[in-house]
Image (cartoon, rainbow, N blue to C red):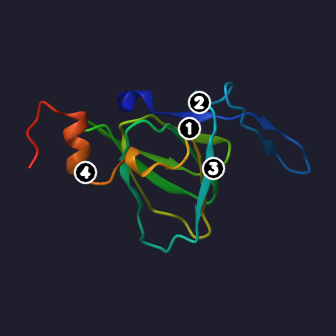
Amino acid sequence: MVLNDCKIIELPQVHDPRGNLTFIEAGRHLPFEIKRVYYLYDVPGGSTRAGHGHKNLQQLVIAMSGSFDIELDDGYTKQKFHLNRSHYGLYICPKIWRLMDNFSSGSVCMVLASDYYDESDYYRYYKDFLRAVRPEKVHE
């Protein structure tokens, strides 16, 4: 998988004068079954989150409220996404390093994940991530 496989997914919206509704169905809107949901909130100004990669996990990241930036890195190329609408999600495929920052006050980030938490699926150090995704390059 490469950075080009990561993309913004527009989720369905049901418009109503009483308030809009968005829904997500595994197998229809996501390329994976949802096994875990978690969310980030009360992130202090100036803080960063993530700073890791996954070996096999797939995720959909949604700004449920407020906004934040996510920089994705496949070991060759980096791309930054600004999330600020609850009917758009960023699909992140395996073997992508991610860094989240620029959280607005009151922002809430929800993540739908393809598997249960498994520490062995993480790349916690960037140099280990680079060794895995760019074996042709010598990494200090």
Give me the disc on residue 87.
none
- Which residue is disc 1 drawn over? 114
- Distance Cα–Cα, label 2 vs label 4: 26 Å
- Distance Cα–Cα, label 3 vs label 4: 25 Å
Asked which secondary structure carries label 1, the reply is loop
Left or right: where 100 falls relative to 24: left
Give the mark, 2 or 3, whose residue is nearer the N terminus. 2
- Which residue is disc 4 drawn over? 126
Q: Are marks 1 and 2 in contact (CB under 8 Å)?
A: yes
Q: Amino acid at mark 4?
A: Tyr
Q: Amino acid at mark 2?
A: Phe
- Which residue is disc 2 drawn over? 32
Give the mark, 1 or 3, whose residue is nearer the N terminus. 3
Asked which secondary structure carries label 3, the reply is strand
Left or right: where 15 falls relative to 37: right
Q: Residues within 10 Å of mark 1 (few under 14, many from 20)?
A: many
